[in-house]
Image (cartoon, grey):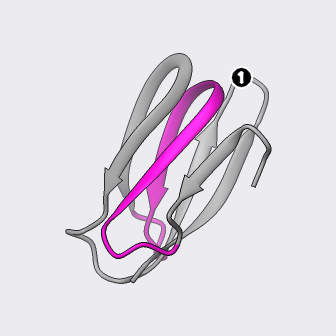
C-alpha cells in the first residue's frame, strides 16, 4: 500500500474507508472476474470515501486508484 493511501478495515464484513492525502482522479473496484462494480470520479482532490460492500458477495475484489502520476492497485477482502 502506498504511503499516501489507507484502505481500512481490510478485510471487512461491510464497509471500508478509502483515504488518500494525494489528489485522486478515479477509484474503481473490480470483481475477481474483472467486472467494474463501483466507480468514483474525484476531480483530482484528496479522497475520503466510505464504500458499502454489503450488497456484494464475500470474496476478493481489486481496488484501482488513479492519480496524475500513476495507478495503484489494492486487494480488498469482503468477508
Question: Per the image, is 32 magenta?
Answer: yes
Residue designated by label 1 = 68
**Splitting the image into 4 quarters, where does residue 73 fall?**
bottom right
x and y, in percent, of residue 74 in the image? 64, 60
Residue at point 71%, 41% (across, down): 71
Quarter the N terminus occupies: bottom right
User: Which of the two residues, 53 or 13, is positioned nearer the viewer here?
Assistant: 13
Q: Residue 7 location, x and y as percent?
A: 57, 54
Q: Residue at (50%, 41%) from the top-left corner?
A: 27
Q: Quadrant of residue 13?
A: bottom left
Position of residue 54 measured from the top left corner of the image (x, y, whole percent): 24, 69
Where 15 sits versus 51, above or below?
below
34 vs 12, nearest the viewer: 12
Magenta range is 11-35
Image check: 24 left or right of 48? right
Circle 1 crowding by C-alpha within 10 Å: few under 14, some 14–19, many from 20 = few
Amino acid at each position: 500500500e502506498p504511503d499516501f493511501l489507507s484502505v481500512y478495515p481490510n478485510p471487512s464484513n461491510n464497509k471500508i474507508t478509502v483515504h488518500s492525502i494525494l489528489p485522486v482522479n478515479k477509484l474503481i473496484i473490480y470483481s475477481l472476474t474483472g467486472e467494474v462494480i463501483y466507480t468514483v470520479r474525484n476531480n483530482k482532490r484528496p479522497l475520503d470515501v466510505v464504500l458499502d460492500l454489503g450488497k456484494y458477495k464475500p470474496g476478493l475484489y481489486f481496488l484501482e486508484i488513479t492519480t496524475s502520476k500513476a495507478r495503484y492497485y489494492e486487494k480488498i477482502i469482503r468477508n
